[in-house]
Amino acid sequence: MSKNIFKISVGYVITFLFIITINFFIPRFMPGDPFTYLSSDESGMNVTYSDEEMQKYKEYYGLNKPLGIQFVNYIRNVLKGNLGYSIILNDEVSKIIISRITWTLGIVIISIIISCFFGTLLGAVSAYNRNGLIDKIIYSVFMIISEVPAFIIALIFLFYFAAYLDIFPLSGGFKPFVEYESSFENITDIIHHGVLPAVSLSFINIGNFYILSRNSMIDILQKDYIITANAKGLNKSRIILRHALRNAILPIVTRIFLSLGTAIGGAVLIENVFKYPGLGTLMREAVFFRDYPLIQGIFLIMAVMVIIMNLTADIVYKKLDPRLK
Amino acid sequence: MKKELLKVKDLKISYFLDSEVKEAVKGVSFTLYEGETIGIIGESGSGKTSIAMSIMGLLTNAKIEGKIIYDGIKFNTLRQKELNRYRWNEVAIVFQNRLDVLNPVLTIREQIEEVLKKHTMKSKGDIKKRVKELFSMVNLEEKWLSSYAHELSGGMRQKVLIAMALSCNPKLLIIDEPTSSLDVLSKREIINLLKSIQKKNNISMLVISHELPVIQELTTKVEVLYLGHILEEGLTRDLINNPMHVYTRGLINSSCDINVYKELWGISPKINLKSGNGCPFYQRCVQASKECTQKLPRLSYISIERKVACNKGGIVTILETKDLSKAFKSHGSKIYACKNVSINVKAGEVAALIGASGSGKTTTAKIISGFLKSDSGSIYFEGKEIHGCEAMRKIHGIQIIFQDPFSAINGDFTVEKAVKEPLEILNIGSEEERKAMVKKALQDVQMPFDNEGLDIRCNTLSGGERQRISIARSLVMKPKLLIADEITSMLDPSTKANILRLLKGLQNEKGFSMLFITHDLPLARKIADKVYVMNRGSIVEEGNALEIFNKPKCQYTKKLFKECFHMTV
């Protein structure tokens, strides 16, 4: 058992090193460089650096050194936990990411709980009434939902609930420039801002959970042991919950962890629609300004999340399925 | 008066498939009395498992008509919830042993305990005690209780399934293929286990299996199922020793547990899907006639305790001789070459007439085929008395193949002429039809049948080839009975093997009966269904081939076998 986990972990470490390497090289092969952008701000006022100044900055950030040396330095720093210094925001990358990731994780986790719960439940209902009217209705609705791109759903929500009905705020993660009177007020405000992004994000995942749960349940309900359970004269609830769902839940659990890993990436578009102060919005800014250290930092965190969640999924699945022990 | 425990009446099951409705069981009726064990045998797809599942009310997507009455209660009209009171508690099932029959993520203990909890016991202590009791009943160590299905071997899983089925002390136990996929030792163990359980608890059982030894050991009565119809019903021992339906005989002949000596031949798989209203077995039956394509036979008694569904009342007798006697005069004294010989050959059967040279075998053959006239006695072919060469002279009659292919065929004839001769003499068919029949017969015996092949002169052929020509010459007449008189004694072993396999294959395909005359005992043991032993003109012993070869009763037969098989009798 532990030997197995060790083996799997070695695989993940290799993957991780591979990702760091790619992470280092990609921004350096992108066209453009950070200093041309530093020199032209959005107001259109051109502040041009002289060649001399550019040279100075490049030297300061170590960008004038040969690639090989930059790479070695990069790895050394990453392993120390030092992700570098953001060129735009003038702060440590790791600090920036930590301050932003909580926002993203918040809506991601909530959205996964929502989508997993409803998706699995409706999937099971659908499977049990397979080919019946209920199944057909639910199935069609989910087919449509999963075909519509998430940012369009987000925009529709934004227009309807925020702009038209004015129930939710248009953007951001909290009211700017406000002093909260109590922490309760603070929390309600954050929740108030988080509802639309979280619900929109749920739409990305709910289709997956629904289809997975439906297929898995349909498959399980046809198994011989369900017939056995029926023959035993057991109650319907026991057959569905203990015999069927206990088996059908296995692929769903895996999917939950995999979704946690990838959902941060998926959140990028949603966060940008709502201007939510999470990692996704940060990433857009970083790419826009060619802020190499920040881009690398964000990519690295996302990749690490995927790896960790994959590993967790592997381990949890093995715990849940006695056949793999 | 025995009490009826389960009565199935005119049960029909149809499955709703994507676009069609498929009838799997078509009007099956039987009654199981308390303490009795009934077996259901039949090929896969005959509807055995469907019947079991319908009794338990487990079929989804299917329409069930007819009555399933358990202990006076109409099972198939109960709602699932009402049915749950009887399921497992009174009627339990041991499913066919597949990995998925047990839930892979629940422990064995939980899967057994849940039925006790549901049906009989409430206290945890009682449940624990009962589970232990069940495990010791099926000889399983308790440590396996906390394991999962995939950790058990096939035999252990089967025991778990049995223990689980017995947990609530059911009155009726349905057992589906209890030993398939088990090795010999586990098989034995499971059979013994089921036997002892049945004896101890006096449980009624419905055993479904395609393995005849299982049925033989566990059941007293048996139903033979084919495409959803019961074709034969009877007491297990009688039915296996003396099947009365062609299908049952085919099943028994296909079992190497029962046929330890004979070569294996399945029932010919001629399946034409359009069956119409006639007998379901029509396409594969060796004795089918036109009537069978239109009339559905009903299951009816042909003797006490035996029912057969056949338009002809079961396997028909093709040839029957009564007290044939023939004496030759030699030096003034009368020598009986054949004395009160009574034999009968059924449709599709191979009867071997064995005995030493000079025992009167060939004389008997000659009398039957009409070459010799008997002094007394009579011969019946398909129930009608025949005289002389009558039956030899017609299509679908009797044909004979002789020992010596060289003298049996005129060497100057071409192959075509030799095979066509009987058709020409009897003026059957037009010239083209005859040629087509000849070609077909030659093709059947695996000889060249193109124009070049037809023109070969018989004297250029080898012994084996000539014997094939003899067989072809018989086959053009489409005989119902083929008498083969020592046809392989002049052939080398390899040719002999080829000719025999060919002949047996043709017999299996075309369904004719054979009277196989030989002194070659090992050969007879390989092909005969029934054996007649002749000595000094008389039949000294007759019966089922297996019984005779295993336990000869007559001193003469014993002596013969002792010499031949070195067996100690």
Image (cartoon, coloured by chain):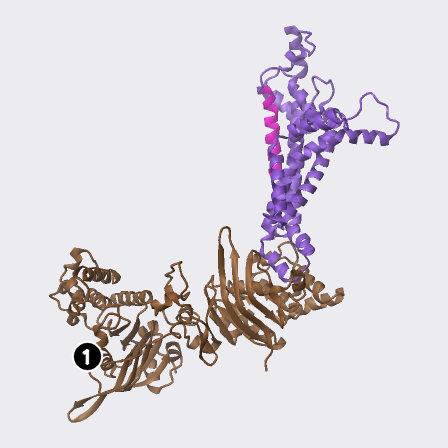
Chain colours: A purple, B brown
Residues A258 and B216: in front is B216
Residue B437 lies in the magenta-colored region? no
The single residue placed furthest to the left in the displayed view is B412
- In which quadrant of the rendered image does the C terminus of chain B lie? bottom left
Between A214 and B426, which is closer to the camera in this rendering?
A: B426
Q: Nearer the viewer, residue B548 or A219?
A: A219
Point out residue A15 in the picture as x, y percentages from the top left corner: 60, 34
Q: Chain of mark 1?
A: B
Disc 1 secondary structure class: loop
The front one of B507 and B566 is B507
Q: Residue at x 49, y 56 (%)?
A: B21
Which residue carries the number 1 mark?
B371
From this view, report whether residue B429 is shown above or below residue B359: above
Residue A108 % position (x, y): 70, 34
Instruction: Please state if B326 lies on the left or on the right of B294 as rendered.
Output: left
Of all residues, the one furthest to the right in this rendering is A181
Residue B151 seen in render: no
Q: Is A12 in the magenta?
A: yes
Magenta residues: mostly which secondary structure?
helix
Q: Quadrant of residue A282?
A: top right
Q: Quadrant of the N terminus of chain B?
A: bottom right
Q: In this rendering, does residue B262 appear at all?
A: yes
Q: In the image, what residue occupies the spot 84% across and 22% down?
A: A178
Classify residue A285 by image quadrant.
top right
Residue drawn at point x = 72 percent, y = 32 percent: A198
What residue type is disc 1 on?
Phe
Q: Quadrant of residue B72?
A: bottom right
* Extent of the magenta region: A11-28
